[in-house]
Amino acid sequence: MRSYSKQLSSAAILCRIVAVALVGLTAGGGWAQGGPKDRIASTISGQSRVSLGQSVHPLARAEFDQGVVGSDFRIGRATLQLTLSDAQQSDLTQLLDEVNNPLSPNYHHWLKPEQFGQRFGASPSDLAKITAWLQSHGLTVEEVPAGATRIIFSGPASGVATAFGTEIHSYLVNGTSHFANAKAVTVPAELGGVVGGVRGLYNFRMKPRSVARRTLAPQFTSSITNLHFLAPDDFATIYNLKGLYNSGINGTGQSIAIAGQTDINLTDVEAFRAAAGLAANDPQKVLVGTSNPGVLTSDEDEANLDVEWSGAVAPKATIYYLFADPNKAGGVSDALQYAVDHNQAPVISISYGECEATATSDGWAKQLASLGQQANAQGQTIIAPSGDSGAADCDNGAAVAIHGLAVDMPASLPYVTGVGGTEFNEGTGIYWSASNNANNGSALQYIPEIAWNDSTSSGLSATGGGKSILYPKPAWQSGTGVPSDGMRDVPDVAFSASVSHDGYLICSQGSCTNGFRDSATYLNVIGGTSTGAPSFAGIVALLNQKMGAAQGNINSGLYGLASSSLSPFHDVTSGNNSVTCRSNSTGCPGSLSIGYSAGTGYDLATGLGSVDASALVSNWWGTSVTISPASSILTTTRGSSLTNVLTISSPGGYTIALTCQISGMPTGTTCGLSPTSLTGSGTSTLTVTVPATSAALRHPGSGWLVLGANVGFGIVGVVICGLGCRRKLARPYLSVVLGLCLVFAAAGVGLSCGGGSSSASSKNTTTGTVTVVANSQGVSHSVPITVTVN
């Protein structure tokens, strides 16, 4: 449990209410709160129960029901999600604002999972009670992550049934067998408001957001068919990565966690890197749980795509491939959860999702939000695709939309960066070489893009995007083109996603025996918004390397740069993600088409557009302006001034405007900078001037009472002195009282117990902050400097 120092603020207070003040002090001048408070007040009896609301998967329907599973059936890995108290949630919301605000002293002060748990998790007592309750039903607690907001357990289906008031049934859907809870989950009333949901009571899999692979015979740049395919060298040329590589920004020292739900063969990754001209750099595989699913062909292409392309964009980064069994555990959702709970890497990429309506009905939305908040508090950036069914995400894989407009999770979370899809639009321009270079690349420059939409009468195939039905619009999501809809909009950025024009080359299922070709000279090509997610994760790893630290939720930075003259985005203004809908189906208009068009600035098909990676990394918050003070901790006295030399630089050579702000300093303190503006780089001198006097606290008729920092002695002294003043103790005792008052006064607690009007002045030590702010081209950076005044 976290231990906070107990500090009593200085205050003037009447002797006659000292005892009351010791019983309870206000939050503004009192004791700092301790760790998580107990919320389960009694023994968990289970005599009355409460429902957790929507907790049944929509495919667990009667027409698919095959009855209760056998008595020997076990749930391999499930998660009990705990909620935060109102006070904790308010604290976390404020923290997430502060860690992303350059003007806050908490800017980028990331928490470790243990620190997150000590501040926002359940109390040790509550965790012990819940663990004992699970065990009483024959369930095994596998892990209590350090964040203390989840409990991972396993056990027989019968134990799950009695613990959660439901039954585990077998379901046969489209010829595939699944298990799931048949009724909504309930918990004992004592856990109401503490347990928010249970994940892992079914094995309906999340779907990868990639278009089915195609094997094609032509060369990469065929003059006959005009077909092209993306090798890593092409991506680096089109999205301007090579300048970063040449300057040493290549992922060195960085790491990316990829979430999956199948094992992979490292020989595929090795073949891909060899064909792309990349040095060997095998990913590190991490099995989540104890059940290895083996290599599942249904997920193998997605896994290889994610591992290969994140590592291709950040070629020297460490790639952690986390995977869990989707048949006996939560699959990719468990892998994502593990990446957050164990703070596996600063960048996380997940290329799976489900529409918001489905995620809400089975309770996954709440748990995703909890994961996203913890990840951002830990400085982790989560990247996810926006989906491949256009504006109708709930109709994934369908031929026509019937469920109306919808967006994909986890991309729609405000704590996640959603990646949409574009398609190259060369027109009459010459953007490809007639032959491939040594790294199998042939792109010559950036290629104009339109919104990706390859939908046909046989199926939906377009970039996802639209308005969330769950999350209000974050403060950072503003700018040209952003709808005034009051809700979170996706995607945020976009990259090439069309498998037809032009797909990404991968190596999977042993397909690369001759460079990128198989033995029959065919190529393994893939598309979908899943291609952009891991690729952009690689760019974020490069950003982290350049900045020298994790960036957490990057969305505020993206929208901030988009609104500045330093915008690194290729604005995509043509195309749409509209798809055909069935007449009289949900939200289907007379035009039988639903979706959004690309336009100037932000749009609900391609977000802010695609990225010039070098411009993004070079002009990121704090990179366009850096401030290095000669000292970040200063000491002075009242009635004096101090100076501090600041070294300031703008790598882009822009004009920098400088200001300073004072917080927590004595009244009348001023700060100034000279010069207040410079171009490119240089120095500026900060001057802080503190007045000689400041107002003291006085209460007429009660004398002075200044409580210092020496609380250990001060409490006892205040009590004795207060009682002595109130009760007018006999002379012998009064002499002791007065003696103790003097002792404690000397120790730092000044007291005056008389009833007269005498007063005494005091110069207390004060510690405050002077924040220097540099603004350049709409991008700002700030540095807090601590100043102690004696």
Image (tube, helix red, strand yellow):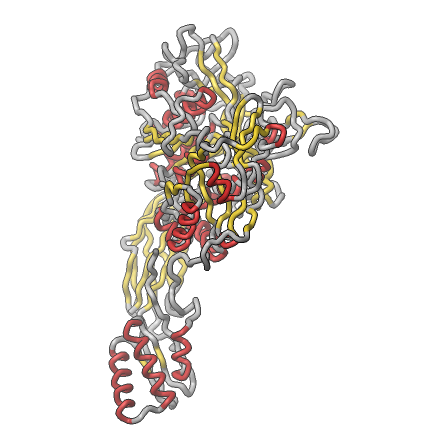
Look at 65% across and 24% down and name the residue there: 400
Residue at image point 40% right, 21% down = 295
354 relative position to 456: left or right: left
Which residue is at a point 36% across and 82% down the rendered structure image?
704
Residue at far front of view? 71
Q: Quadrant of residue 169?
A: top right
Residue 252 in the image: state x and y as whole percent: 30, 32
Q: Is residue 54 above or below residue 122?
A: above
Residue 219: give x, y in percent of width and height.
Answer: 45, 9
The residue at 43%/67% (across/down) is 28
Give the number of callouts: 0
**With respect to residue 105, does 590 lie above or below?**
above
The location of residue 311, given as percent across then percent down, is 36, 27
- Residue 366, position in %: x, y? 52, 43
> Which of 142/716 is in front?
142
Tell me if I can see residue 434 in this picture: yes
